[in-house]
Image (cartoon, rainbow, N blue to C red):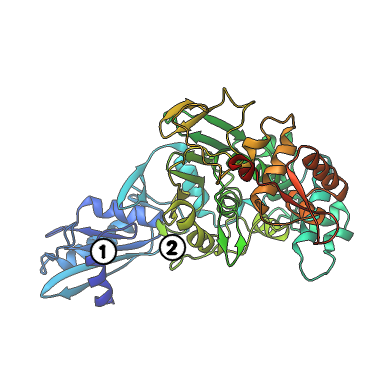
């Protein structure tokens, strides 16, 4: 029996992806059966006959109610009309003296058609599905299995990037904080694949082999394209040329290197503003983008023909990936229902510290996005899962140590919608608040060195004292590489040696004092 309080709430909220109102005064109209079909093919739901679209209750003719209910049951059980015939629940009830017919449609494990047509529920609308790819997605959603587990018996270790395994082992070891030695450190390559679920047995065919998760995580590019040719992630910058793009990177490599490439794309185009939390400096860009990138890579449906996207626009950035949804609509910390779309891949990423436990991503983004972009993030689940994060308006460029005299005279920057030269009077110069890139731009350094110095400056600024150990931690360089980097920065007068705090301590120079002097 319908819960009347729940029905009252539905009337106030209105139609949703799982609630439909139909007028149906004297007879059942054909669009009722289209809604039944679409609910069967999506998440199930409730249909109320005798209610107008806006939620006004008119009721059905009470003398016809029994015949109308019998008609619904007869139609859905007619194999020439509904294929396959579904199970539904139907009842009538009284609401303030008016008769309402309630049809409850449970979610089905099959794809259903009504009079030869397949319908799907998109938001509040019943949509006829005609495209082959959309029909394929419907069947995929109904399979109820994880496609990452599909086994490919003909694959061997030669099809995989075994050169990445030392990095994988080290990241797994670094992620442990209790001093234990990670089991992967002692395993052979084949044992690591088996232990992490990347080599398994297909319970249907009884064949053993590497699965799709293994191909996606560690497959060579040619292996990945052979097994999963539709897989790619499109990274786009749309700030000036919003109809096309200002910068683009199509990522078609394994998930581990895709993760690194997408993070690098974000570092190239997104600011990393200064932020303190409990006297600890945090890089909000890294925190937010890591969550977004991990989601777009880990939780997508890899057999879908649709691609994933990472898009940076003037006032927002978003990721979108095809998925096998469990609902339609907004996701919030209050209603989040964590479910790993690809548990093997998600577990592998967690093991090496590139992802956290399920549900933490939503909470982390709600925690930091307001400070980073000025608004809460927006999570939307459907055939595509999307995370949208607001971006604050780009500030005019500022220099760390005064305006450089050489090296950047012809560089152009964007101020709102206008591209101007860096020596334009429209560019605001503030020697107090600056970015290290502008100081080192005139030095003849390779790009990795520039990135290392930038990371260090963003981490320590001009106040924090650091040594070789901290350089190793921030840049992930070995001790020898960290020593060489420190020597280079000393030779180029980027660092001051700090005395009285132990041997080998340094601080970035504050050139603004020299400018003021």
Marker disc for residue 222: none
Q: Find numbered disc 2 in the image and state the secondary structure of the residue it sits on.
A: loop
Residue 458 seen by the camera: yes
Q: Residue furthest front?
A: 517
Q: Badge 1 is on which residue?
A: 13
Q: Is residue 101 left or right of residue 346?
A: left
Residue depicted at 73% across the width and 49% down the height: 214
In the image, residue 347 above or below residue 456: below
Q: Mark 2 and mark 1: span between their CA atoms?
A: 17 Å
Q: Badge 2 is on which residue?
A: 332
- Residue 499 figure quarter: bottom right
Q: Quadrant of the N terminus?
A: bottom left
Q: Find numbered disc 1 in the image and state the secondary structure of the residue it sits on.
A: helix
In the image, residue 258 above or below residue 102: above
In this view, the residue in front, 453 or 28, is 453
Q: Residue furthest top?
A: 410
Q: Is residue 33 left or right of residue 354?
A: left
Residue 475's x, y, as percent?
75, 48
Q: Earlier in the sequence, mark 2 or mark 1?
A: 1
Residue 390's x, y, as percent?
44, 49
In this view, the residue in front, 40 or 65, is 40
Residue 97's x, y, as percent?
10, 75
Q: Quadrant of the C terminus?
A: top right
Residue depicted at 77% across the width and 41% down the height: 489
Residue 20's x, y, as percent?
27, 59
In this view, the residue in front, 223 or 425, is 425
- Residue 45 figure quarter: bottom left
Q: Is residue 176 left or right of residue 102?
A: right
- What crowding class fits label 1: few (fewer than 14 Cα within 10 Å), some (14-19), or many (20 or more)? few
In the image, residue 93 above or below residue 175: below
């Amino acid at each position: 029996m319908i819960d009347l309080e729940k029905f009252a709430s539905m009337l106030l909220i209105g139609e949703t992806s799982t609630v439909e109102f139909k007028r149906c005064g004297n007879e059942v109209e054909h669009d009722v059966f289209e809604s039944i079909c679409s609910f069967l093919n999506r998440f199930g739901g409730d249909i109320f006959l005798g209610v107008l679209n806006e939620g006004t209750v008119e009721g059905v003719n009470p003398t016809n109610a029994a015949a109308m209910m019998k008609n619904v049951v007869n139609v859905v059980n007619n194999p020439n009309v509904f294929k396959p015939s579904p199970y539904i629940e139907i009842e009538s009830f009284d609401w303030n003296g008016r008769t309402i017919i309630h049809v409850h449609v449970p979610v089905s494990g099959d794809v259903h058609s009504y009079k030869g047509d397949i319908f799907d529920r998109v938001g509040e609308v019943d949509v006829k599905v005609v495209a082959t790819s959309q029909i394929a997605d419907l069947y995929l959603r109904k399979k109820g299995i994880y496609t990452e587990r599909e086994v490919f018996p003909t694959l061997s270790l030669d099809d995989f990037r075994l050169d990445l395994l030392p990095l994988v082992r080290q990241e797994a070891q670094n992620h442990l904080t209790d001093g234990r030695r990670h089991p992967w450190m002692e395993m052979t390559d084949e044992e690591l694949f088996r232990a992490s679920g990347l080599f398994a047995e297909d319970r249907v065919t009884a064949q053993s082999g590497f699965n799709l998760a293994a191909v996606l995580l560690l497959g060579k590019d040619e292996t990945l394209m052979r097994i999963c040719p539709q897989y790619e992630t499109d990274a786009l910058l749309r700030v000036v040329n919003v109809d096309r793009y200002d910068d683009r990177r199509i990522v078609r490599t394994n998930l581990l290197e895709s993760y690194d490439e997408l993070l690098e794309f974000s570092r190239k185009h997104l600011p990393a503003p200064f932020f303190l939390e409990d006297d600890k400096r945090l890089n909000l860009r890294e925190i937010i983008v890591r969550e977004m990138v991990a989601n777009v890579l880990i939780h997508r449906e890899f057999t879908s023909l649709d691609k994933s996207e990472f898009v940076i626009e003037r006032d927002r950035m978003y990721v979108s990936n095809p998925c096998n949804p469990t609902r339609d609509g907004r996701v919030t910390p209050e209603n989040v229902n964590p479910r790993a779309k690809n548990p093997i891949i998600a577990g592998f990423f967690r093991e090496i510290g590139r992802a956290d436990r399920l549900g933490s991503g939503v909470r982390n983004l709600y925690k930091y996005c307001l400070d980073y972009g000025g608004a809460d993030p927006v999570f939307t689940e459907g055939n595509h899962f999307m995370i949208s994060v607001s971006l604050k308006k780009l500030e005019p460029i500022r220099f760390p140590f005064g305006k450089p005299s050489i090296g950047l005279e012809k560089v152009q920057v964007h101020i709102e919608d206008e591209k101007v030269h860096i020596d334009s009077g429209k560019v605001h110069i503030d020697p107090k608040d600056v970015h290290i890139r502008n100081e080192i731009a005139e030095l003849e350094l390779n790009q990795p060195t520039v990135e290392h110095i930038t990371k260090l400056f963003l981490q320590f600024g001009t106040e924090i004292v650091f040594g070789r150990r901290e350089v190793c931690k921030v840049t992930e360089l070995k001790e020898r590489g960290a020593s060489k980097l420190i020597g280079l920065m000393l030779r180029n007068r980027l660092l001051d040696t700090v005395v009285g705090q132990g041997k080998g301590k340094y601080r970035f120079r504050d050139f603004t004092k020299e400018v003021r002097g």
